[in-house]
Image (cartoon, coloured by chain):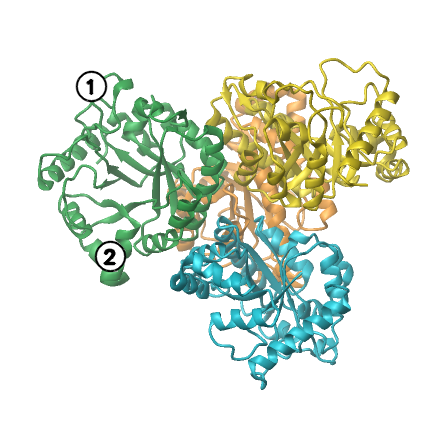
Chain colours: A green, B yellow, C cyan, D orange
Amino acid sequence: MIKGLTLAGVGSIGSLEDFVVKSGANGFQAIDTSGGALRKLIEERGEAGAKSFLSENGIRIGSIGLSVEWRQSEEKFLETLTGLASDAEAAAKLGCSSCCTYILPSTDFKAAHHMTITTRRLRTCAQILGAYGIRLGLEFVGPHHLRTAWKHPFIWTMQETLDWIAAIGEPNVGLLLDAYHWYTSNGTVEELLALKPEQIVHVHINDAKPVPVEEALDNDRLYPGEGVIDLAAFLKAVSRIGYKGVVAQEILTPQAPSQSSEELLKRSADAFIKVYAAAGLE
Amino acid sequence: MIKGLTLAGVGSIGSLEDFVVKSGANGFQAIDTSGGALRKLIEERGEAGAKSFLSENGIRIGSIGLSVEWRQSEEKFLETLTGLASDAEAAAKLGCSSCCTYILPSTDFKAAHHMTITTRRLRTCAQILGAYGIRLGLEFVGPHHLRTAWKHPFIWTMQETLDWIAAIGEPNVGLLLDAYHWYTSNGTVEELLALKPEQIVHVHINDAKPVPVEEALDNDRLYPGEGVIDLAAFLKAVSRIGYKGVVAQEILTPQAPSQSSEELLKRSADAFIKVYAAAGLE
Amino acid sequence: MIKGLTLAGVGSIGSLEDFVVKSGANGFQAIDTSGGALRKLIEERGEAGAKSFLSENGIRIGSIGLSVEWRQSEEKFLETLTGLASDAEAAAKLGCSSCCTYILPSTDFKAAHHMTITTRRLRTCAQILGAYGIRLGLEFVGPHHLRTAWKHPFIWTMQETLDWIAAIGEPNVGLLLDAYHWYTSNGTVEELLALKPEQIVHVHINDAKPVPVEEALDNDRLYPGEGVIDLAAFLKAVSRIGYKGVVAQEILTPQAPSQSSEELLKRSADAFIKVYAAAGLE
Amino acid sequence: MIKGLTLAGVGSIGSLEDFVVKSGANGFQAIDTSGGALRKLIEERGEAGAKSFLSENGIRIGSIGLSVEWRQSEEKFLETLTGLASDAEAAAKLGCSSCCTYILPSTDFKAAHHMTITTRRLRTCAQILGAYGIRLGLEFVGPHHLRTAWKHPFIWTMQETLDWIAAIGEPNVGLLLDAYHWYTSNGTVEELLALKPEQIVHVHINDAKPVPVEEALDNDRLYPGEGVIDLAAFLKAVSRIGYKGVVAQEILTPQAPSQSSEELLKRSADAFIKVYAAAGLE
């Protein structure tokens, strides 16, 4: 499985190009970014130039974030939808085949009705992405405090998300599997082992503080191996079913980290080495 | 618009064949029944015989009920799904192009999750029906007491149902528009006028007691013209947008009616004459 | 049915704005244009300004052309697809709900294989358009000489096109019904009467020279009423099934017309009056 | 990869139950059969009894044949479609998740039009199968003589079939990859290595006589390892991409084989041992 980074956990790392260079220098093989950043990279360097820049640094694009606002008004949805094909085109040109978004576990809208509207909207997003060979990864969000952060409970487990994926009904939709959300939604190794590898679009890795699982905050994560999540079991299971894609670190914290980007990249690299070793992966 | 009957409101009318004969004799042009009853009719009379029996009595089949259990366990769903294609085939042979089901406005399942599962299941039903040229009509259910009859609110308005239809995403899904549910969900004439005729699969007509709308019980309906629903406005609007299909009476009552079928058919026929006249329809 | 114009047949009419002003001044109610032209109009006048400009001239947008290249390479398809959502957004803002493309009746690609690829591509186009409430109209092309203009026969009849629409499988795809193609594909009034109005996305009107139908050239059309097509029957049938949309004139000719735009607009207006009257329409 | 048998190549083996027992006794792990045979097995032994009968013999069901007639008239299609859900239900109960059909490489129907109709029909089949967790495998058919056996060329290569699968657009459709058809359509190892394992629903194995590939007849096959197909390369490639499903022998011959079933089973078992060894598989 490919070791990747998101911007969450690497401090003030600079431009996309800085991110690429420094990630590669620290032994990472992938980074996550936005479609807009990729479009800019191609504009500036040309498609061939952008590709060779990435490959010279040993970096591939793990995933881009879904830039469409699919949770609020129809107007906003339609307005932001206009850029998705260009995002997808840029990602495809650079060999990236994944675009991800997360699911808030509660909503101020009536839950069942909100589900009908968002099912339709995510299907449209998946259809556009699919034209370019890009898959859409849906990240269920486990922390308990978010289940009551808005008026009505929505969904937050892997099974619910798989059922949503079936409702969306497009071949290119799967899971963004985040270790923190797996842990906080009381996921099990058995559930992971029951997945087929093609059901996983992307993986996030991170760790949780030693508090009761009900109290783990979404925005208060640790680096892999520094907390209580059984990441060895998580990684081993994901690898065992045949997933060969990117595992990207994502460390959301209440304050910006005090360490420098250099220190954080080193810390992240060490974290990966530690948890991969614990999982018996090289 | 074609005057039709369901079994609800005609008493103990006997077999499907009795229902056909008596409905035709009382000036009705359509009846609603089940796919199973149509299969039996074809078995007994042959396709041509069944067709001529209907046409001799001036009766078409307005709609069949969806025989699939799509609200409970997956096992039950898959088991009952096996008969749907045969239902659809029988309906298509007899010129019926409509199959309907109703939506309970609350559920013991978690609402958003239940929506994902039922969206997938109804899509499958629509796909099978669509192969035979049959449309699936979804009936939203308005009475307020049913919104809390189970643990979690689901959906009960026309707009929510239209949004669900878009989420299901099949071309052959539309509304079963029931006057009682339109009334109890505080539907407006403007909402009806905003519909395109092809969005309506089937129409039910009935009336409500003069109680506050919040207290109108699903199971305590009156014959058309005997209550407080503005059926003239309802019918006029549905006709004005170009709907030309069946308007079938459905009178759910707490006890079986005390009148004979003959009396109830006469009462129903008079009711239609009255409300059609009030709407300026012939 | 709304009287509309395309650019084919009105000579060198100038800008989109000239086209709008002059069409309105000649009694037309709709014009066809491109999504790009609408985007430019909105950029220059703002959404509200563009709307009031159209309404002050009594003109609505009948349809925009599909700007996606769906018949050639995948690269070209993906590249041109990026602009479709913006086209659709502009059309939707200005109240246009139709986007059309035509089907060449032969192809240099292997026919069955080409059908698989174009089915997928047109489905993607329909899905994007559908998000904005825009329908996709497919125009079958009847002239016999085009059936052998490329190596392999493709499709050219209304029934084939309806079957393709079913294969595409999206609710918002229908026919662009062109009188010339109906005539040259030996279409019948019965076929038109068998349509439901929602199966028609857009209508083109024009006329054919008095040559054997097999010899009628795609690019050699007459103004409505000047030729041999039974436009009275065509219009009567389309109106009778309930179609209420735009009927746009499209006159393809071998050379640019020698008359001025003013003369051509007058000639077109007279042509509509004549054929509408023949069809018993006002 | 699981060693399987079809009835083609095992002689007069008797009932489904005989086929199961004898296949298991000869070291095979899977057999292909029909949905009807599985329904009968469940009727006679009950679901639990049928399952334990299979497992006692070390046999799973590799695939069932698609019992729907999707190539001819709409009437026949709709009639045969009624049984598909029951086939799928029986297969799912017994742990089978694959249903296959083959594509004739030419057709008497106009090719592009036939493609529209069969795309829609196979989509409906896939949708019904998908409800039960069954995948639909499409087998492209390579022999050159069949490309002109009917009036118009249809499709016969893997890439065309993949493009068709994309046009069908359901997540549960993939390839039935048959070594004979791979060979006769001039398939390459590179093409196999470019597949994702989930694109393969089922695999057939067999061999070809030492004639020019253009002259290899569909109906004149050899047992694996007895002919000229590079089955070592074929199996190695399919295994290398991660396919772990059934590889079923299918030997179509002009006459019924003269050997007994016992001899043919032994010959088949030896053939598998030989070609698996050549491919470096156990």
Quarter of the view holding residue B193: top right
Q: Position of residue A27 (x, y in %)?
A: 16, 43
Provide the secondary structure element on which disc 2 rests.
helix
Quarter of the view holding residue D91: top right
Name the residue beneath numbered marker 1: A210
Q: Earlier in the sequence, mark 2 or mark 1?
A: 2
Q: Nearer the viewer, residue C15 or D50?
A: C15
Label 2 marks a residue whose chain is: A
The structure residue drawn at horizontal position 72% and vertical position 64%, both measured from the top left corner, is C282
Q: Give the farthest residue toward the bottom.
A: C258
Quadrant showing the C terminus of chain D? top left
Q: Is residue D281 left or right of residue C60?
A: left
Is residue B276 placed above or below C120 in the rendered structure? above
Distance from disc 2 to disc 1, alpha carbons, whole Å, reads 41 Å
Is residue B172 shown to the viewer in this render?
A: no
Q: Position of residue A209 (x, y in %)?
A: 20, 22
Q: Nearer the viewer, residue D221 or B252?
A: B252
Q: Which mark is residue A41?
A: 2
Q: Residues within 10 Å of mark 2 (few under 14, many from 20)?
A: many
Quarter of the view holding residue B43: top right
Which amino acid does the dot numbered 2 rest on? Leu
Q: Position of residue D274 (x, y in %)?
A: 45, 42
